[in-house]
Each structure stands twice: as structure tokens, then as C-alpha cells.
Amino acid sequence: MKTTKLVSGIIIIVLGVIIFFQSMLAGVGNALDNSNSHSGSAGVFVAILYIVIGIVYLATRKSPKMGGDIAGLVIAIIAWMLGAFNVGIYKDLQVWAWLILIIGVMFFIWHFITNRKNNN
């Protein structure tokens, strides 16, 4: 689990940087188009939350407790809500929102099952 959290934390941070730059370009497109879409701004917040989740996974990779996974799940749910409900011209935001929700839920379930097996 330590190696998986390390690798996935790094990948999530890299994805957060990519999403950040995509969102900035979508925000510029929103401004130039004079549209009422907020998908670029929501994408920036989703990117920041991606980076936060990656840092949480990196910081708690050696911890046997569930605190890091619970925090990651809560942040993933917030990122999912921001991304899924603010899709405008930036359609990739919906993909990024669902991806982080799946990652957060899977890590939580995996750690929960691992802790339950270790306690028995």
C-alpha cells in the first residue's frame, strides 16, 4: 500500500498541474467568449484539490490509520461536486471529477478492508 500511495500521489499531483493549465485556458476561453460558464474557474479549484489529495496521499502513505484516506475521500467528494456540477465549455472537467471520486472511494475501501483483515 505504501508504494501504491506514493505512485498514485505523484500521478495525482501531475494530473492536478495538467488540469490547472487546461482550466486556465478554458477560463480564458470563457472570458473571450463572454459566456456565463464557470467551468474554467471550477476546473482551477478541482486542480487545486487534486494537488491537495496527492499531498495527503504522499504524507500518509506509511500511516496504518484511516485519517488520510478519510480526508482524501472527503476532498474527492468536494472536487467531484465542483467538477460535475460546473461543466460548461470545459467538458474534460466531468472526466476529471469522476476520476478523482473513483480514486478516493477505491483507496478508502481498500484501506478499510485491509485494516479489517489486520484486526481479525
Image (spheres, helix red, strand yellow):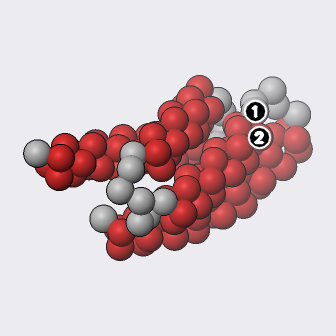
The crowding category of the residue bearing disc 1, from other C-alpha atoms within 10 Å (few below 14, some 14 to 19, many at least 20), is some
Between 59 and 83, the one nearer to me in the picture: 59
Residue 79: name its quadrant. top right
Between 42 and 7, the one nearer to me in the picture: 7
User: Mark 2 sits on what residue?
Assistant: 41
Q: Secondary structure at mark 1?
A: loop
- On the picture, is 33 further left or further right than 100? right
Between 5 and 13, the one nearer to me in the picture: 5
Residue 34: name its quadrant. top right
User: Mark 1 sits on what residue?
Assistant: 38
Query: Which residue in the rendered view is the most extreme toward the front?
Result: 119
- Position in image of residue 17 (x %, y %): 66, 64
- Position in image of residue 2 (x %, y %): 36, 69
- On the picture, is 87 further left or further right than 45? left
User: What's the residue type where badge 2 is placed?
Assistant: Ser
Look at the image and tell me whether residue 95 can be seen: no
The crowding category of the residue bearing disc 2, from other C-alpha atoms within 10 Å (few below 14, some 14 to 19, many at least 20), is many
Asked whether the residues under the numbered discs 1 and 2 touch, taking CB atoms below 8 Å apart as contact, a structural biologist would say yes
- For the C terminus, the image quarter is top left
At 84% from the left edge and 49% from the top edge, which residue is drawn? Answer: 28
